[in-house]
Image (cartoon, rainbow, N blue to C red):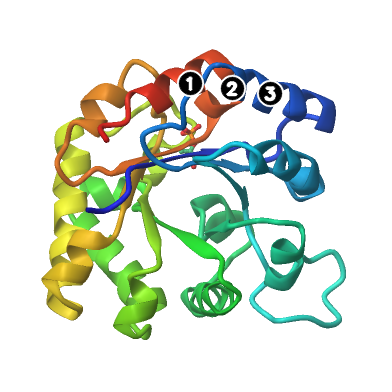
Amino acid sequence: MRSFIVAGNWKMNKTLEEGVALVRDVLARFDQPPPGPVVFAVPFPFLQAIGALVRERPGFYLAAQNCHHEEKGAYTGEVSADMLVSVGAQYVIVGHSERRQYFRESHEQLAKKVDLALSRGLTPIFCCGEPLSVRERGNHVPYVARQLRASLFHLPEADLSRLVIAYEPVWAIGTGKTATAAQAQEMHAALRSLLARRYSPEVAQAIPILYGGSCNAQNAPDLFQQPDVDGGLIGGASLKAEEFAAIIRAMRR
Ligand code: PEP
């Protein structure tokens, strides 16, 4: 049975002090391990400090929000997959729409990031999703399928099965406009059947597909009830302990 996962993407928010207080507050709300992995995707400078807090707590994990697509070298200001591993990260977000849009990350670069992350034992949380214009034309499924084909389908089955996918419609990110549960389910089911055709039904069934885009404590239970929605990648709502804890409690299993 695939994992149910809730991951909080802090983006470029919080100071170290605020971030530590937030994680302490979330952890204090759970006596027992959560029903599935809970991942904090924090800014690079906070990785070690937040890692030290979650290391002691079963079920809670550390993620980076990005890594460079080359192993190492003269890339001033960049962070490598090895560096992430060396500070204790277990997951890394790859291909968030803000990285695709503002940093022009290409399908090819994302494929390299996925390869590198997997080769270092990191679990990539691979983001995909369509802009509003594409959805309005009704081309959302082929558009997202192309993102998967271009950056993931070179992987052998054993590697692909170590991924987490996050479907995040661009028009829903940070806008307060959530996909309906039916819209999320339609896309997740389409992606799962694409994976089944390219790989195998077993692999398709085993890969967690998270929903992201203005997910909050109110809409999470409905989204998480969908059979192909295996949790959420949460932006704004992960910055408030009470709200993030409520989303964690909405996990199905
Ligand atoms: C995100 O950035 O991954 C995200 C889903 O953001 P928000 O929840 O704020 O829409």
Helix, strand or loop at mark 1: helix
First along the sequence among labels 1 and 2: 2
- Residue 15 position, x and y percent, is 81, 30
**Residue 132, image quadrant:** top left
Q: Is 105 located above or below residue 141 in the figure?
A: below
| Residue 217 left/right relative to 138 | right
Q: CA distance from mark 1 to mark 2?
A: 6 Å
Residue type indicated by callout 1:
Ala
- Residue 27 position, x and y percent, is 60, 24
Q: Is 205 located above or below residue 217 in the figure?
A: below
| Residue 25 left/right relative to 180 | right
Callout 2 touching callout 3 (CB < 8 Å): yes
Q: Which residue is mark 1?
A: 245
Q: CA distance from mark 2 to mark 3?
A: 6 Å
Q: Nearer the viewer, residue 79 or 247?
A: 247
Callout 1 touching callout 2 (CB < 8 Å): yes
Residue type indicated by callout 2:
Val
- Residue 228 position, x and y percent, is 18, 47
Q: Is 66 located above or below residue 219 in the figure?
A: below
Which disc, if any, is residue 73?
A: none
Determine if residue 216 is in view.
no
Determine if residue 21 is in view.
yes
Helix, strand or loop at mark 2: helix
Which disc, if any, is residue 24?
A: 3
- Residue 190 position, x and y percent, is 15, 58
Q: Residues within 10 Å of mark 2 (few under 14, many from 20)?
A: some
Residue type indicated by callout 3:
Arg
Residue drawn 39% across and 78% down?
Answer: 159
Q: Which residue is mark 2?
A: 26
Q: Residues within 10 Å of mark 3 (few under 14, many from 20)?
A: some
Helix, strand or loop at mark 3: helix
